[in-house]
Image: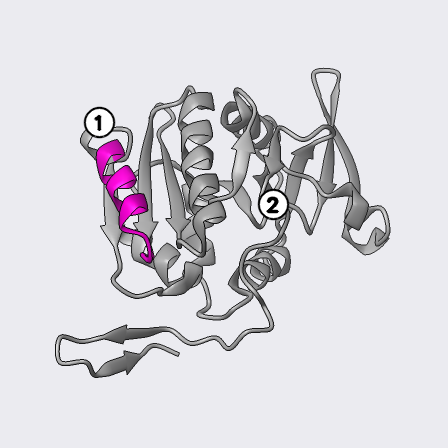
């Protein structure tokens, strides 16, 4: 089977700045991949203008599937919503605040393919300012045709490239405010490491200023009569 990638992109319109960043991030993603992809966007709402933007991208066939939640169901629930719709043999789970360099996706897939015997996921992002301070996360380097790549436990939770088999093995995201970290823990506990380029092939434009992890966390859906059902 030739490579087909399913890309899961979740958005919530926290404010105008984040809305503009999400639109730019999606355009950057679409403009830098060169592998057939089904882009799945789960929109947690709060901005009708953002939803119109995503719908227009869907009309242009840039987005294969667009789902809008009326309530903010948070990233973990939204990512799980996309799971039954994944058809690619590769899966990307990407945050909505990343700007990409050309061929970042193909580079990540190439890295995983080059070491088929290793349990790897890939990411275009590395955080040396964190990992250099904490040697527990570092696992040396791998070489691919003269280029060196970092091997780590704690990179990539905001943009993960993996085989579909890995995605199915890991299963659903836990409904938790730190679901990305818990998913990374699950990968590590299952023996996976993250391979990243020595120089980033993407930029975290959100600068980790998104969700407030100290805030109250609950996932609720409001019904037609105003009552709510809780998922947490």
- 132 left or right, relative to 91: right
Magenta-drawn stretch, dominant element (helix, strand or loop)? helix
The magenta region covers 44-57
Residue 95 in sight from this viewpoint: no
215 w.r.t. 62: above or below:
below
Q: Is 152 situated left or right of 106 in this image?
A: right
Specify the farthest residue to the bottom: 227
Number of marks in picture: 2
Judge by depth and name the residue closer to the eye, 109 or 219.
Answer: 219
Q: Residue furthest top?
A: 145
Crowding around mark 2 (Cα neighbors within 10 Å: few <14, some 14 to 19, many 20+) is many
Quarter assignment of residue 56: top left
Q: Measured from the top left, where is residue 128 in percent x and y? A: 78, 42
Tell which tag, 2 or 1, sits nearer the viewer. Answer: 1
Identify the disc placed on residue 156. Answer: 2
**Magenta stretch: residue 46 in it?**
yes
N-terminal-most mark, 2 or 1: 1
Q: CA distance from mark 2 to mark 1?
A: 29 Å
- Residue 179 counted in the magenta span: no
Q: Assign the N terminus to one quadrant of the image.
A: top left
Instruction: Kindly identify which numbered label has been placed on residue 60.
Output: 1
SS category of the residue bearing label 2: loop
């Amino acid at each position: 089977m030739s490579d087909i990638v399913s890309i899961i992109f979740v958005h919530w319109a926290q404010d105008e700045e984040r809305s503009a960043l999400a639109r730019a991030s999606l355009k950057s993603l679409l403009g830098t991949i060169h592998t057939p992809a089904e882009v799945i966007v789960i929109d947690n709402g709060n901005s009708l203008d953002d939803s119109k933007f995503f719908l227009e991208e869907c009309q242009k066939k840039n987005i294969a599937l667009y789902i809008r939640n009326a309530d903010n169901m948070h990233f973990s629930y939204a990512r799980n919503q996309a799971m039954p719709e994944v058809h690619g043999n590769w899966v990307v789970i990407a945050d909505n605040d990343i700007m990409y360099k050309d061929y970042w996706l193909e580079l990540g897939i190439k890295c995983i393919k080059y070491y088929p015997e290793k349990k790897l996921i890939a990411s275009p992002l590395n955080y040396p300012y964190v990992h250099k301070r904490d040697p527990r996360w570092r696992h040396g380097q791998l070489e691919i045709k003269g280029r060196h790549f970092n091997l780590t436990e704690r990179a990539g939770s905001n943009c993960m490239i993996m085989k579909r088999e890995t995605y199915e093995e890991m299963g659903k995201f836990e409904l938790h405010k730190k679901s990305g970290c818990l998913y990374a823990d699950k990968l590590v506990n299952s023996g996976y490491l993250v391979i990243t380029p020595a120089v980033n092939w993407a930029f975290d434009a959100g600068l980790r200023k998104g969700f407030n992890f100290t805030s109250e966390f609950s996932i609720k859906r409001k019904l037609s009569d105003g009552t709510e059902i809780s998922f947490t």
